[in-house]
Each structure stands twice: as structure tokens, then as C-alpha cells.
Image (cartoon, rainbow, N blue to C red):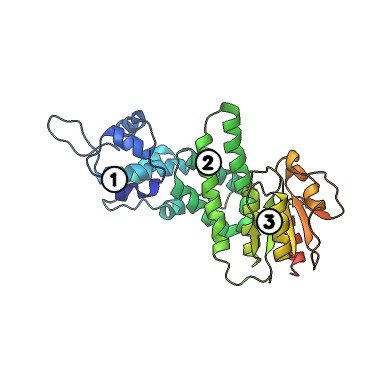
């Protein structure tokens, strides 16, 4: 199965079988037969002595149908829009989003839930382009903190819960994690003139492998024109201390998702440097931890706020 559905219309060859189209779209052959029987979205090419086969235009129309269904459009309406598409129909995501994303006439909570549902469905059919386009659109409209809190946390929670409950869908979680990392990296790549002379330091302590939240923090800081350095998952004390000695960051943020990784030794053993950095801890693992040398940030917004104060903003 191809994971990036956005290029199907360009890559697919004409005269495809039902099985080939089903693989490319990520649907069952029976679904294609249902769409043919119920809505007339079937193969248009026919040769004597052979089964009907799908042309490039047929495939483009089916991709429109598939994406509109994922976006929550009723199948009959999605089929009608696909059938009305011209031979050179575009399957690009932005044009479909303009008609399919929920209108803001609903409450904010309803709109957010609808978008999360769309993202979950897109992840389950591996539509990478759809996921990335929606996330970029939401980041541009609401910023990193809002997108993280309102969309990404519910999305990641639902996908993770499905895997834990059924044991299926680990590939969805991995694909989604990589897409989120890639999209969150874009604000960092676009940071040209940071306001802080020395970057703040971000690290996952202990054996902590969960790093998406700290990547979100780096992106949120970049939105505020604050440069950061991220040491990655499972940062050992020796690596943390060496960077602190060399860089003397104005702020140090230590993330622990799990309580077993929230070891106060990582705070107490930080070397003394001048000027003294503000130490901030975050993540569920640190919840309830009391430490005179560190400030606990309960969420992404408060972490950014503490770091902003540390760099003098």
C-alpha cells in the first residue's frame, strides 16, 4: 500500500484492475464494487474478453470520493462531487478542505471534535498529505499551543488508546508520530532571527522516549522567536551537564512523561554556571514533584511563558 495518497493521480498508470486500485486507495475491493453499484463510480475502460479496468480519471475520481468520505462528507454527496469532476480534476487537499472542513457556525468544541475525527480517519487510511495539510492549516490559524492542546493531544490519545485496547494499529501510531514531528519542525526551520543570544536547552531525562511534547514546545518557542536546542530522547546526565557548561543556557527544560524518569538527581547534579539558568520541569512524570531549584510547568503554555521570562521577554 502506498502511504502518500496525494500523488496517486500522478503516479498511477491507466488500465488498473480492481485489486490494484483497492491497494492504492487503501480500501477493500468490495468497497469499490459497492461504490460502482450504488453511485456509478466504476471502471470506464473495457476490452473484449477482459474485466473492466480503471483509467487515470477513474482513479482520480475515486481518490476524491475517498478523501471526501474521510473528511466526513456523506457518501452519496461525496460520490456526486466525484462524478461531476472534470477529466483533469484536481485531487489536491486544499481544494477539498475548502468545502469539507466544518464551518465555524458550530461551537468551538464541536469544530475541534470534528477535525480530530477527520485526523483520526486520515491516519487510519495512511493519508499523509491530508494529515499534513490539515495540521499546517490549523497551525497557521491557531498557533502551536492551541493546535497541540485542542487537536494533537486528543488525536494522539485516541490513536494510542486504540492500539492499547485492541493491539492493532501500531503502524498508525508510528506514521502519525513521524508526521507530527515533521510538521512541528517547520517553525524551527523558519526561525531566522531569534531574540535570545543563547539557545534554551530542552531534554528528555532518564530513559524517557516520549518526545513529541518537547518538540511541540520547541515549535511554540520558535513561534515566539526563541531559539532552543533539543538533546533528544533518553538524554544522560553527562550529556546534559556538558552542554550546560559549554552553552550556559538561560533556561533548561526537563521533560518526563513517566514517573520513573522524573529523577531529582537530574536537577541537583546540574553544574553551576553564570548566569544561573532557570530550571523548568514538565510532563506527567513530574506531577506533584517539589524542588526548590526547579519550576513545574503544568502545560505547554506555562512552559513557554516561564522560558520567555528566563530569556527576558
Label 2 sits on residue:
174
Label 3 sits on residue:
202
Q: Answer with mark 3 or mark 1, whichever residue precedes in sequence.
A: 1
Is residue 296 placed above or below 140 in the rendered structure?
Answer: above
Pointer 1: residues within 10 angstroms few (<14), some, or many (20+)?
A: some
Question: Given contact means CB atoms under 8 Å apart, are the residues at marks 3 and 1 in contact?
Answer: no
Q: Residue at x 55, y 65 (%)?
A: 190
The spot of residue 223 in percent (x, y) is: 62, 63
Q: CA distance from mark 3 to mark 2?
A: 23 Å
Q: Answer with mark 2 or mark 1, whichever residue precedes in sequence.
A: 1
Is residue 146 placed above or below 126 in the rendered structure?
Answer: below
Q: Is residue 242 visible?
A: yes
In the depicted view, which residue is nearer to us: 34 or 266?
266
**Could you tell me which quadrant the N terminus lies in?**
top left
Name the side, left or right, on which 246 lies relative to 269: left
The spot of residue 97 in percent (x, y) is: 46, 52
Name the side, left or right, on which 106 lies relative to 63: right
Q: Answer with mark 3 or mark 2, whichever residue precedes in sequence.
A: 2
Mark toward the viewer: 3 or 2: 3
Q: Residue at x 81, y 61 (%)?
A: 272
Label 1 sits on residue:
12
Q: CA distance from mark 2 to mark 1?
A: 26 Å
Amino acid at each position: 500500500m502506498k502511504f502518500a495518497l496525494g500523488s496517486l493521480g500522478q503516479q498511477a498508470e491507466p488500465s488498473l484492475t480492481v485489486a490494484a486500485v483497492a491497494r492504492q486507495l487503501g480500501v477493500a475491493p468490495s468497497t469499490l464494487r459497492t461504490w460502482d453499484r450504488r453511485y456509478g463510480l466504476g471502471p470506464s475502460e473495457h476490452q473484449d474478453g477482459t474485466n473492466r479496468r480503471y483509467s487515470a480519471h477513474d482513479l482520480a475520481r475515486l481518490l476524491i470520493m475517498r478523501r471526501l468520505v474521510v473528511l466526513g462528507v456523506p457518501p452519496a454527496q461525496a460520490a456526486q462531487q466525484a462524478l461531476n469532476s472534470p477529466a483533469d480534476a484536481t485531487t489536491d487537499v486544499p481544494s477539498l478542505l475548502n468545502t469539507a472542513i466544518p464551518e465555524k457556525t458550530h461551537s468551538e468544541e464541536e469544530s475541534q471534535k470534528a477535525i480530530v475525527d477527520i485526523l483520526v480517519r486520515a491516519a487510519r487510511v495512511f493519508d499523509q498529505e491530508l494529515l499534513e495539510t490539515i495540521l499546517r492549516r490549523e497551525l497557521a490559524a491557531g498557533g502551536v499551543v492551541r493546535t497541540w492542546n485542542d487537536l494533537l493531544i486528543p488525536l494522539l490519545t485516541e490513536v494510542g488508546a486504540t492500539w492499547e485496547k485492541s493491539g492493532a494499529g501500531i503502524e498508525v501510531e508510528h506514521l502519525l508520530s513521524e508526521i507530527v514531528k515533521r510538521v512541528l519542525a517547520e517553525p524551527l526551520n523558519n526561525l531566522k532571527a531569534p531574540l535570545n543570544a543563547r539557545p534554551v536547552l530542552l531534554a528528555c531525562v532518564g530513559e524517557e522516549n516520549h518526545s513529541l511534547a518537547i518538540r511541540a514546545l520547541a515549535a511554540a518557542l520558535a513561534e515566539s522567536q526563541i531559539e532552543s536546542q533539543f538533546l533528544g530522547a533518553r538524554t544522560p546526565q553527562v550529556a546534559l551537564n556538558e552542554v550546560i557548561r559549554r552553552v550556559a543556557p538561560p533556561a533548561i527544560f526537563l521533560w518526563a512523561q513517566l514517573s520513573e524518569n522524573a529523577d531529582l538527581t537530574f536537577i541537583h547534579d546540574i553544574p553551576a554556571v553564570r548566569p544561573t539558568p532557570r530550571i523548568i520541569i514538565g510532563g506527567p512524570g513530574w506531577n506533584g514533584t517539589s524542588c526548590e531549584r526547579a519550576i513545574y510547568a503544568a502545560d505547554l503554555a506555562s512552559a513557554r511563558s516561564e522560558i520567555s521570562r528566563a530569556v527576558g521577554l
